[in-house]
Image (cartoon, rainbow, N blue to C red):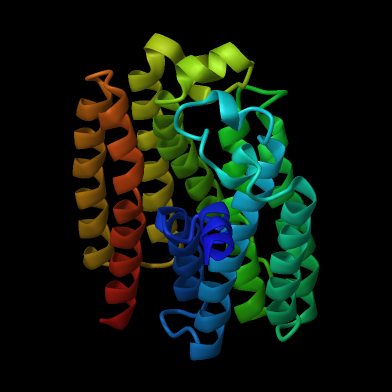
Amino acid sequence: MHKLRSYISLTRLDRPVGIYLVLWPALWALWLASDGMPSAYLLFVFIFGAILMRSAGCVINDYADRNFDGHVERTCNRPLATGEISAKAALLFFAVLCLIAFAFVLTLNSLTVYLSFIAVFLAALYPFMKRHTYWPQAFLGAAFAWAIPMAFAAVQNDVPWQVWPIFAATMIWSLIYDTAYAVGDMKDDLKIGVKSTAILFADKLVPIIGLFQLIMLTLLIWIGNLFTMGSVYYTGLVIVAIWFVYDLMRLNEKDDALAFKVFIQNHWIGLIILISIALDKAI
C-alpha cells in the first residue's frame, strides 16, 4: 500500500487539476469538430487518454527534476526525490503509461495514430526545457494543446486549418496559468538554475499576463466566428474575461499563495468555455 501511494503521488492522481487542464481543451476540440455531437467512444478515449498522458507527463517531469526537487521546499517529498521510487522504475512506469494510452489510440484512424507520436515527444520534451529556456511553459502548452489536432483527426480524419487558432489559444492559456504556478518557485528556481516565464517577466509579470489574457480572448472570439457560435458561447467569454480581471488583481498582490490559487482555480476557465461550447451547440 505504501508503494501504491508512492506511485499515485508520482502521477499526481491525487491532484487532478492537471488532468482538467489537459482535458478541457481536448473536449473543446471534440465538440467543435463534431458540431456538438461527439461519440461516446471518443469521449471515453480522450478522457482516459488525458488521465494517462498527464500521469505520464508527471512521471517524466519528476525523472527530469530528480536531482533538483530535493532542494525545493514544495517538491522535496516527491517519491523520486526521496528515493522511494528509483529513476529506472520511473522510466519504466512512464513507458507503460504511454503504451496503454497508445493502445487506445490504435483503435482510432491512422492519422490520429501518427499524431500521437508527436504527443509523446512533446510530453517528454517539456521537463528538460527548464534547463535551456525561460519559456518551458510554451512547451508545456504545446504538449497540452496537441490533443486538439488529435481530436479533429479522430472525428474528421483531417486536421483543418481552423484547428490552429484553438491550439494557439490553449498554448497562451498554459502560459497564463503555468506562469502563475511558477511564481511560488521563483526563489528556489533561481538558486538551482531552473528557468521559467515567471523569472523572465519579473516585475512586468502582471501586464504581460494581462496581454496574454487579451490575446487568448481575441483568439476565442475568432474561434467563435470560425465555428458560427452564438450568444451562449460569447456570454461564456464575458465570464472568462471577468475571471481574468480577478486573476490579475490577485497576481498584483505579489503573494505566492495567491498566485498558486490562481493556478489551481484556472481549470474553471476551461470548463466554462467547454460548457459554453456544448450549450451553444445544443441550442
Q: Is residue 136 left or right of residue 258?
A: right
- Nearest the viewer among 132 and 276 is 132
Give the residue at x 46% y 29%: 182
- Nearest the viewer among 46 and 151 is 46
Give the residue at x 41% y 39%: 177
Looking at the image, can residue 169 be seen?
yes
Q: Is residue 49 above or below residue 204?
A: below
Q: Where is residue 229, by image quadrant?
A: bottom left
Could you tell me residue 202's position as x and y percent?
Answer: 44, 12
Looking at the image, can residue 162 be seen?
no
Q: Where is residue 282, by image quadrant?
A: bottom left
Could you tell me residue 163's position as x and y percent?
Answer: 58, 60
Give the residue at x 70% y 24%: 131
Could you tell me residue 262's position as x and y percent?
Answer: 30, 38
Q: Is residue 118 above or below residue 275?
A: above
- Nearest the viewer among 133 and 98 is 98
